[in-house]
């Protein structure tokens, strides 16, 4: 298993930007695709973005396409989520997740390891 720790959340005004980071430890020698998910109060956890092991393939949920960018630095065991043009509806706890294998996925059940999350609040 892989241990994941997110950071970079905070309070930002609408239209602003934030960059989330997720550092992996443990069995990082294995090949893992990574994903970002979010959960707003009273709502189910939803997919945001995913990236394959090499970083060559990315996949985004429609609400964030063109505004968010997922990337990774395997030398640092870190995955990033650059968020721009933030909207109040982006407010949520953001979770980093890892899944064995190299392929991207939007399915929560296909991820094996999860971080504890970082809060992102966008004010109007």
Image: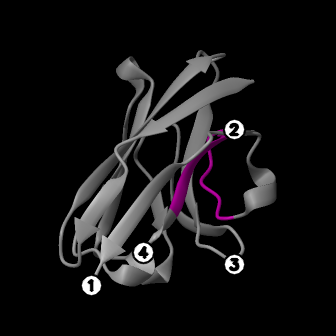
Give the x, y percent position of residue 88: 36, 81
Q: Which residue is nearer to you in this view: 71 or 123? A: 123
Q: Which residues are magenta?
A: 93-106
Gap in Å between the C-alphas at discs 4 and 1? 11 Å
Q: Comparing marks 3 and 4, which lies closer to the viewer?
A: 3
Q: Is residue 74 above or below residue 18?
A: above
Q: Secondary structure at mark 3?
A: loop
Q: Comparing marks 1 and 2, which lies closer to the viewer?
A: 1
Q: Is residue 83 above or below residue 13?
A: above
Which picture quadrant has residue 25? top right
Res 60 label: none
Disc 4 crowd rating (10 Å Cα; few below 14, some 14-19, many 20+) is many
Res 90 label: 4
Residue 39 is inside the magenta segment:
no
Gap in Å between the C-alphas at discs 2 and 3? 31 Å
Reading the image, the residue beneath label 3 is: 42
In contact (CB < 8 Å): disc 3 and disc 4: no
Is residue 2 rendered to the left or right of residue 10? right
Q: Secondary structure at mark 1?
A: loop
Is residue 48 rendered to the left or right of residue 83? right
Quick check: can you spot residue 29? yes
Q: Comparing marks 2 and 3, which lies closer to the viewer?
A: 3
Reading the image, the residue beneath label 2 is: 101
Gap in Å between the C-alphas at discs 3 and 4? 14 Å
Give the x, y percent position of residue 27: 66, 16
Reading the image, the residue beneath label 1 is: 124
Give the x, y percent position of residue 41: 62, 73
């Amino acid at each position: 298993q892989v241990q994941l720790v997110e950071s970079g959340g905070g309070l930002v005004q609408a239209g602003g930007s934030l960059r989330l980071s997720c550092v992996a430890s443990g069995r990082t020698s294995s090949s893992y695709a990574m994903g970002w998910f979010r959960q707003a109060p009273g709502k189910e956890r939803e997919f945001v973005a995913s990236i394959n092991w090499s970083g060559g393939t990315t996949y985004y949920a429609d609400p964030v396409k063109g505004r968010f960018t997922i990337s990774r630095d395997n030398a640092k065991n870190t995955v990033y989520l650059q968020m721009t043009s933030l909207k109040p509806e982006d407010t949520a706890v953001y979770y980093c997740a890892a899944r064995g294998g190299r392929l991207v996925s939007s399915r929560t059940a296909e991820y094996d390891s999860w971080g504890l999350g970082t809060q992102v609040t966008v004010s109007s």
